[in-house]
Image (tube, rainbow, N blue to C red):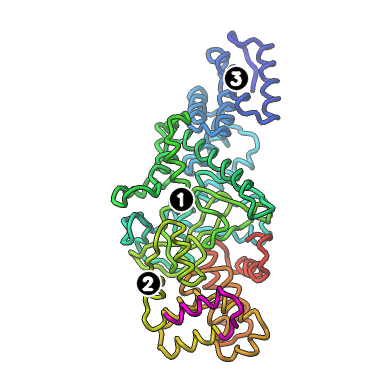
Amino acid sequence: MAAGPRDGLDEESLQELRSRATRLLLKEDWEGYAAVCSRIVHGAAATDRRVLCSALAHRADARARLGDRPGALADCDAALAADPTHPAALLAKGALLRGLGRYAHAADCFRAALPAGASGADEVREMLEQCRRLEAQARSGAVDLSEWVLAGFSGKCPDLAEYVGPVEVRRSAHGGRGVFAVKGVEAGATLMISKAGATGRGVIPDAADSDEKMVVWKDFVDKVLDAAEKCPRTASLIYALSTGEEQEDELAVPDMAVFKPESEDLRDGVPEAGIGTREALDVDRVMKVLDVNCLTEDAPSANLLGNSGIVNCGVGLWILPSFLNHSCHPNARRTHVGDHAVVHASRDIKAGEEVTFPYFDVLTPVGKRREAARAWGFECRCDRCRFEAEDAVLRQELVRSENELFNGGADMGALVVRLEDKMRKSMVKERRKAFVRASFWSAYSSLFDNGRLMRKWGRMVPGEAVVAESVAGAVGGSESVLRAMLRGSNDGNGCGNRLEVEDKVVRIGRATYGKVVKRQAMRALFRLTLDGDNSKGL
């Protein structure tokens, strides 16, 4: 902070406050640092414009780190009102606006900081270019993580912009609300990119350690409540989610504009102040919302990139993805990149079709899936569940096979051959064959993984890649299905010529990961998938 003549704050007092601020800065005591900056602001308010603007810019940085975005932007605007070209204030405001998703406005600040003589011009130009890239991404949803993937997920996690694609929240035919495609999209297309309102992550050596999980959960809940206190937009979005206790007709359908960062009211650059106190929040309601809307990063419908095996327990609240309903015949998956969830179509989606992803493992028979659905508090009535539970021709065989699968001791090769023979004789359509194969995927996998069983039964069942392609049609992308496709395609059994095989592999790869990488990087993900080594980034 520059020195100058002052009446309200003498030189000795200013130097003492600067020294104290430096110590607090090194300790990252942002509350203390903001308090010292406030003393300088009050002392220099009427006497030294340079000291005032510098103190305001520094306090803005501290407030931003504390989550007080309204206060931080107010400080930036006060500094720029006194000096419209103040470099530190321009940079601080640009950083705040970038964090709010206002990339064009942030770029204006960074651009203005360059001729104002801001130090680190190259860094400022880099931030300016980043804003341009994120603004384009926020409009198109186009994501390219190729360089990061090819570098082995080293370095900083790529910045992503929030994006709302061709979807909207509507009343669902199955009750409540759901997310629907407003136009047809192909497998792999990005549907939305959502930044978490809060996340909780931890390292839990024992996956069954409920005490450790509770620590992660408590940390996560505190972050959610803190975010809701400080940001009215966050609070209103949380309140828009279901608690699981409302009547279905009581749930309002939100306007899609509320999910876009630009919906936040900046009020001449300053967002509306937060709720302010924990007491002002409806904490009980927030807790109920979290119970039924949180997403985990290791869910069956999710990919986790860049984890490096350090964190094995991650939970978060991603608002718009929380509106997606479950289906055992899903058409969407999500990829977690830092605090962002990228939701993509895992198979082609028609205009007007509901967008769904699985809440639990759907590569299991209908009996197990129904148990899982009851644990979640609902009954799945998707076309796959209805077919498997009600089909007069196959129902008895499916029940028998499910009992054998889970009672142990059954020959998985014999089970698979019997299922395939029953479907062939009953002239079951390919779509329904895919449903059955998905339900007994563990039996098929056991057969394909066992050389002895394959020598005995292999000639009597479709090839591994053929089955994998079929199952992908039922459940969309899946790492285990992709792994089978990759292994089976090497054999070339029933897969077609080389170009056809490559096209099928890439198609299932897009269904699993979305269109977030180019082909070379996709091959790197394929290698990780074949290794099955989740500790290296998946």
Question: In this view of the protein, which residue sits in the foreground, 123 or 44?
Answer: 44
Q: Earlier in the sequence, mark 1 or mark 2?
A: 1
Residue type at mark 1 is Asn
Magenta segment includes 444: no
Q: Which residue is mark 1?
A: 293
84 lies left or right of 427: right
Element assignment for label 3: helix
Per the image, the residue denoted by label 3 is: 51
- Is mark 3 in CB contact (under 8 Å) with mark 2? no
Magenta residues span: 396-414
Q: Examine the residues drawn in magenta and state their main secondary structure.
A: helix
Give residue 225's position: percent from left, percent from top.
50, 37
The amino acid marked with disc number 2 is Arg
Q: Is residue 459 above or below residue 125?
A: below
Q: Residues within 10 Å of mark 2 (few under 14, many from 20)?
A: few
Other residues around mark 3 within 10 Å, as few (<14) / some (14–19) / many (≥20): many
- The numbered mark at residue 386 is 2
Q: Quadrant of residue 27?
A: top right
Q: Quadrant of the C terminus?
A: bottom right
Between marks 1 and 2, how big is the CA–CA gap? 26 Å
Count of marks, rendered view = 3
Q: Position of residue 407 (x, y in %)?
A: 56, 74
Q: Nearer the viewer, mark 3 or mark 1?
A: 1
Task: Tell which circle, 3 or 2, labels the residue nearer the N-terminal end.
Answer: 3
Q: Quadrant of residue 503?
A: bottom right
Q: Secondary structure at mark 1?
A: helix
- Tell whether position 399 is magenta: yes
Q: Residue furthest left?
A: 249
Residue at position x 41%, y 70% in the image: 385
Q: Is residue 206 visible?
A: yes
Mark 3 vs mark 2, CA separation in Å: 71 Å
